[in-house]
Image (tube, grey):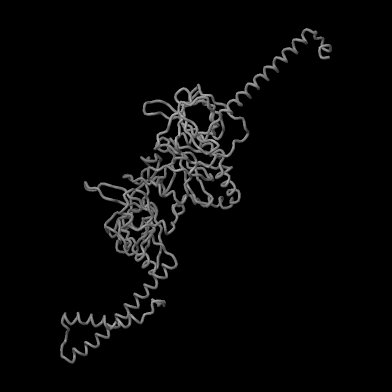
Amino acid sequence: MFGRRYGISLELRLKLFSSRSSFIGFFLKKLSAALFKRQKMESNLVNFTELQPLMDNWTAIVQVIEKQKVQVSRNGKRYQKLVFVDSQGQTAQALIYAGDIMFFRKYFEPYRRYYVSNARIQNVLPRYSTYPNECSWTIDNSTLVQEIDEVDPPLIPNVFNFADYDSVYQHIDTTDEIDLIGIAIHVHPKAIRGGTPTRDIILTDHMSHPMVLTLWGEHESEEGQDIADMIHTQPVVAALRVRVTSYHAMHLSTKFSSSILINPPIQQANDLRNWCSHNQEEITRFIAERTYGDRLKLLPVPDDDRVITISDLTAVVEARPYWIRGIPKLLDRSQKLWYHSCPHCYKYIRARPDCEITCTSCYQRIRLTPRCRLTVQISDMSGAITLDLSGDDAEQLLPFCISDIQKQEQQGNVQYATIADFIKQKNLVCLVKKSNTIHSSRSSEKYNAIVAHINNATAEENYVISKYITNYKATASTWAAAQEEHSKKNVTDMAENMAIEKVDSIMEGETQSKGVDQLSPSNTEDKKKKAAVAAAPMKLRVNPTKKHRT
């Protein structure tokens, strides 16, 4: 019909039909070959735990968790590390070297699934393995890799060990690397520190705990920019292998080996998104009030069972932060109570404050500002340590602001006595860390306060603090027992005083009758013994089950 209408000859029509048939046949052949290849690969499927070195003709379905940055080994060889997981929740690490990195540049996208066949397998040393007989993979251009065509990949099994926000402080300024997940609710503009681009990401968990994550270098230029572009959607961010620093009380910081996962397909991310959708008003207020910039919110007062005694602190060998509680006392009534520092990174700089300079730490153009510092002795009943405080933690212990102290210095009359009286009335709950410093060619221990909370304790509370030092576990029964003991002590003291007065009057009469003006030292000892005997019946009359007013 078509040929007749347009004058196409029968011969030409036969050629067209033949070519169309050839194309259909070619397509069907390719499709059948692909189906056969997939069917053959699936017939050889193995789990990660079944893999062994020198194993042939195997195929595994891998889901990509991480595709890390390209690194350079000690011998100058470029490599890239991948982290896979199988359907059973077992993980495996794979390495791609040198030119093969470019060969697989379009493969192994995070969260996607692939068929991987016949990669080279090696055993992982037991001290590095996460499960028995774990193997590492080496993928080169002879390894068969086929992407699984699916719209949405399945949820990644629960293979992460995310830290709780209220336990992150334990890793401050240590070599530990932690994993953390949260909702990204705010992004700071890009900044340059020491010639390296950085960006601060504000995270929060389902308990509205704030956390600041600083992305450095390639993490800022890649994942940081992606998060900034989608911050209006409040993406879920999982930070893997990040360090915890005491910068501005507590910050997370990426390393080159860290990984930043954006909206990972895991159950924890779904739970966070669900919480976020029901707490938008709280999140909006959180950002407006800049809660993430408050050191007391970043490191709130801990539960009692997280507080240790000072004697336990001094017995710890490992330099790790710990919470303590005690009464401060001013040391060295000639100490300098402030110093000039960078207003951004707080680095101490000796320079004129009226000149604009470039900070040697954060490389920002600044004018120096005065910053408070203070050295105190903090003690509980178990012991005492010397503690350095700075910034707001130190200034809250002073009855004067820094400008007033500077005026007193100019007049040569710093009111240290007033400062000492003001300080000793405080009760501190501090997160402290120990560092070894060298003074006068000898090693000495030094403690620095990361954050300090003032607890204006009453006299009864101070008595409990000094009496009950085991983690300061202030349960209702402990408080009741302590207050009752405190009451008994007051009643006993009152009884002894009354007995002494009674003995005084008796002995005064004896003295007058004997004509003796003063008692000898031996008679004074007799007086104390008689007072103790006279007080004994009164002590017995104190009801131990009845509370007495102090």
Image point (44%, 35%), residue name:
133
Looking at the image, the residue that sits furthest to the bottom is 513
> Which quarter of the figure has residue 312?
bottom left
> Which quarter of the figure has residue 543?
bottom left
Residue 178, how many percent across, how many down?
44, 43
Q: Is residue 437 left or right of residue 145?
A: left
Q: Is residue 277 left or right of residue 292?
A: right
Closer to us: 182 or 312? 312
- Quadrant of the rendering where the N terminus is positioned: top right
Residue 445, how many percent across, how many down?
28, 51
- Give the tally of numbered discs: 0
> Which quarter of the figure has residue 389?
bottom left
- Quadrant of the rendering where the C terminus is positioned: bottom left
Closer to us: 81 or 33? 33
Residue 506, how many percent across, how many down?
24, 88
Residue 498, how many percent across, how many down?
30, 83
Image point (43%, 46%), residue name:
251
Q: Is residue 364 left or right of residue 291?
A: left
Look at the picture and state if 348 lies above or below 472.
Answer: above
Closer to us: 210 or 61? 61
Q: Is residue 337 left or right of residue 142?
A: left
